[in-house]
Amino acid sequence: MKKENTYLPRLSALSRSLIALGVGTLVWLVTVGWVGWQTRLLLAWLGYTLTVLMLIWLIIGQADACRVAQREDESRPAIFLLTVGGALASLLAVVVLLGSVKGLSGPEATRHVLLSGLTVVSSWVLMHSTFTLHYAHLYYDPDETAQVGGLDFPGDEQPDYLDFAYYSFVVGMTFQVSDVAVKAKPIRRLTLLHGVLSFAFNTLIIALTINTVASLL
């Protein structure tokens, strides 16, 4: 079993989001008068996203999934919906920013494209990292029969966060499960939602890529 960090796993979903929101707000305020509002919005979202990802992956790398998943607070569903919704909404800001690329000079257009690309990648990783924590919570949260589970991983070892990350990112990339069997209705429904959102997100990424290439030609 992994040696658990004494502080990071104690950060609830709400605490992580508030810390990241503080970073994003600071970025928004610091960039006043430097860049346009579209760029400021994406930079603030990047500050939020990268902070949440850092906290999530430090937990994934150091903490015991069972203990942390059972400690997640009641605000977790709302934070989950806001995070996934924000990741999808960030694509709209990217569309607005890329819409102005054609009239910009070479270096400035390149900066816009790089910022947009980083925003898309970080939002994509954030969405599937958030689903990772949600799968772990559903797996280790006892139901009315005091049973845990719902995902049947190969092997006999207790699944850790990297196992849930494997499941989450496979669904995110392929819109289907691989060698992990789903045996609980809540997780099955979450997997369905995850697959649909992933398909929509990836389709938008492809459309944005085609549009960006066309605008630069």
Image (cartoon, rainbow, N blue to C red):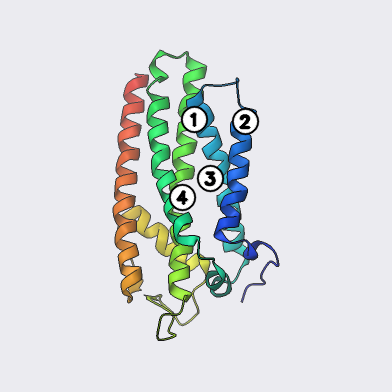
Residue 195 percent location from the top left of the image: 31, 56
Q: CA distance from mark 3 to mark 4?
A: 9 Å
The residue wearing badge 3 is: 49
Numbered circle sitting on residue 114: 1
Nearest to viewer (mark 2 / mark 1): 2
Q: Are marks 1 and 3 in contact (CB under 8 Å)?
A: no
Q: CA distance from mark 1 to mark 3?
A: 16 Å
Nearest to viewer (mark 4 / mark 1): 4
Name the residue located 52 percent from the left edge and 71 percent from the top edge: 160
- Which kind of residue does numbered mark 2 sit on? Leu
Residue 85 percent location from the top left of the image: 40, 47
Q: Nearer the viewer, residue 195 or 90?
A: 90
Q: Nearer the viewer, residue 182 or 193?
A: 193
The quarter in which the N terminus is drawn is: bottom right
Q: Is residue 161 left or right of residue 32?
A: left
**Element at badge 1?**
helix
- Residue 150 visible from this viewpoint: yes
Q: How many other residues sit within 10 Å of disc 2, few (<14), some (14-19) or many (≥20)?
A: few
- Which kind of residue does numbered mark 4 sit on? Thr
Q: In the rendered view, would you say 24 is above or below 2?
A: above
The residue wearing badge 2 is: 29
